[in-house]
Image (tube, rainbow, N blue to C red):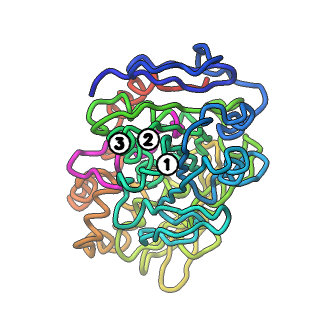
Amino acid sequence: MGSRRSFILSGTAFLTSCQMATQRMAPGYPQAQPQAQGGPFMLGIDFLASRNFDLLRGKRVGLITNHTSMTGRGEMTRVAMQRALGSSLTALYAPEHGIDGTIGAGVHVSTRRDHVTGLTVYSLYGPTRKPTPQMLAPIDVLVFDLQDIGCRSYTYISTMAVAMEACAENGKHFVVLDRPNPMGGWRVEGPPLEAKWKSFVGQIPVPYVHGMTAGELAMMTASSRGWISQSPRMNVVKMQGWSRNMVWQDTGLRWYRTSPNIPHATSPFYYVATGILGGAAAVDIGIGTENPFGYAGGSGVNAQAMLAACQSWRLPGVSYSPYSRNGFGGVRLNIHPHTQADLTALDVMLLAEVNRLTGGKALSRMSGSKLNLFHKVYGSESLYSNLRKGVPSSQITRSWANWTHSFRQSRQRYLMYA
């Protein structure tokens, strides 16, 4: 792709990325440096609203949105934008789980009319996951405002990446309204994504946990060769007052469940700790309980044996209690939001232990589409093959070290927050 430059809306300024194509800078926005810690907290949508949506004035606007797209005051982004822009807000676009966030994982979403705004909601999780030229025809600029959870296999970032590509191909401007990474900005964990296993649960080649905001990922995606076929003209509207050491609980914001099984502000941590395990056979990760992804068990597993193994790992900020129900046994997890433990490594350790305690059934009973999805989520076939060969989980997780170190270095130029 050609060299591109994008200007990123900051407190009173734009941050410039040196690898993006030159654009006209909006009046009154000189260049800025990455934001320092402190000051009043504002989401990207709130800062844009404080500027009277000047970035969007005079344009036909489309919005990728759902129930998590809320202002800091608890108003729907689409309502705030429609009030400010009137008929210039012409179309809405919904990701997996739909605009109301009630549709189950992997279930296709239908194009429909929004009962709140009266606008058409084009589905980006149905026959197509990339906006078509027909979907983009009513707009000049496409705005992305979804709350991500910070994990590669969560599809909202995949929606962003393919929408960026579609905007580039159709001459549309792309804008990201930035939001916090609920797990903070330092946690970088997990294996790389092999090109063979690129999919909608692994669209861009970042670690399983990347420690970046959606806006930062958009910048990196647009600048990294081969991540998308073309880069759009784009802006990222920065947050104010967010810093990398802040998890969601530090923001003072209300948490809106991002999907049916991510109900709590702490849920992203549990999703990382057991999401890969959940792809195995005859396992239980607590779906349908008060804390989805908060359990690690298997069919016929002795809960006390699982507890003893977990306690022997002595991971800081993670504790366990035994449970048994419906023929499954294992442990209930308790994860502190500021834990320093590698939660992706914990996921692999839990999988290895459950597989051992089920006599290998957790992995040996996987086949077909389930095994294919397991490889896509992890990013390669290596986890499955290594565990079946008896490779220790510690050896598997150590193999990520060079990759995550390299990613930390390569992401540095796109980090917008101190």
Q: Which part of the image, by quadrant, shows the C terminus?
A: top right
Q: Are marks 3 and 2 in contact (CB under 8 Å)?
A: no
**Residue 158 point in image, percent of width and height:** 41, 50
> Which comes before the other along the chain, label 3 or label 1?
3
Residue that carries the numbered disc 1 in the rendered image: 343
The image position of residue 186, as x and y in percent, is 54, 33
**Residue 179 showing in the rendered view:** yes
Q: Vertical placement of 105 versus 185: above or below?
A: below
| Marker disc for residue 249 | none
Residue 28 lies left or right of residue 2; in this view the side is right
Query: What are the residue bounds of the magenta stretch?
Result: 191-215
Q: Mark 3 or 2 closer to N-term?
A: 3
- Whether label 1 touches label 2, CB < 8 Å: yes
Vertical relation: 187 (above or below) 123: above
Crowd around label 3: few <14 · some 14–19 · many ≥20 (10 Å): some
Q: Please tell me whether mark 1 sits on a helix, a strand or a loop.
A: helix
